[in-house]
Amino acid sequence: MTLPAFASSDALLHFAQSAGGGAGAPGGLLGNPMVFMVLMFVMMYFVLIRPQRQRQKQHEELLKALKAGDHVVTSGGEHGIISSIKETTVMLRVADNVRIEYDRAAIASVKKAADKPEEAAPAKS
């Protein structure tokens, strides 16, 4: 059994070479999958990784700056005033004679001075 002339290996090789037309890599530089992967990683870094690291650094600075008397909100939503600070925990006063100990990492935010009604100047009548 013989192959037809168009299916011989020489004919297929000639057809493959002539079909390419002598062109280089298709698509040029952007057709390279490695370049595409690098560009995707750079985009992911600036969209996801970098902002997350910045938020983490801000939260660490917030936790280092905590002091007694600060009005804080925990990650669970509890509002309280810091009565004492230990190395890894804080004691919050949430009501009269009610103190709860929280891990420092549970502090989500510190309320600003404008948010503290006790420190606002009393209205004169």
Image (cartoon, rainbow, N blue to C red):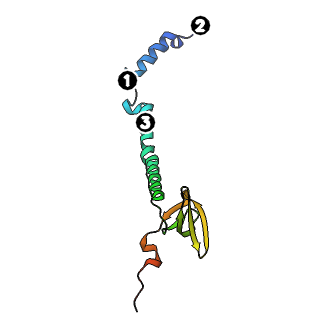
Nearer the camera: disc 1 or disc 2? 1
Upstream in sequence: badge 1 or badge 2 = 2
Q: CA distance from mark 1 to mark 2?
A: 35 Å
Q: Is 113 placed left or right of 81 in the picture? A: left
Nearer the camera: disc 3 or disc 1? 3
Q: CA distance from mark 3 to mark 1?
A: 22 Å
> Label 1's element?
loop
Q: Is residue 89 above or below residue 80?
A: above
> Which quadrant is home to the N terminus?
top right
Counting every numbered tag in the picture gives: 3
Disc 3 and disc 1 in contact, CB within 8 angstroms: no
Give amino acid for label 2: Thr
x, y (%) of residue 34? 44, 31
x, y (%) of residue 65? 45, 60
Q: CA distance from mark 3 to mark 2?
A: 50 Å
x, y (%) of residue 116? 46, 74
Q: Is 37 placed left or right of 94 in the picture? A: left
x, y (%) of residue 13? 47, 13
Q: Which mark is residue 24?
A: 1
Residue at position x 53%, y 65% from top? 84
Upstream in sequence: badge 3 or badge 2 = 2
Give amino acid for label 1: Gly
Q: Is residue 110 above or below residue 43?
A: below
Residue identifier under label 3: 38
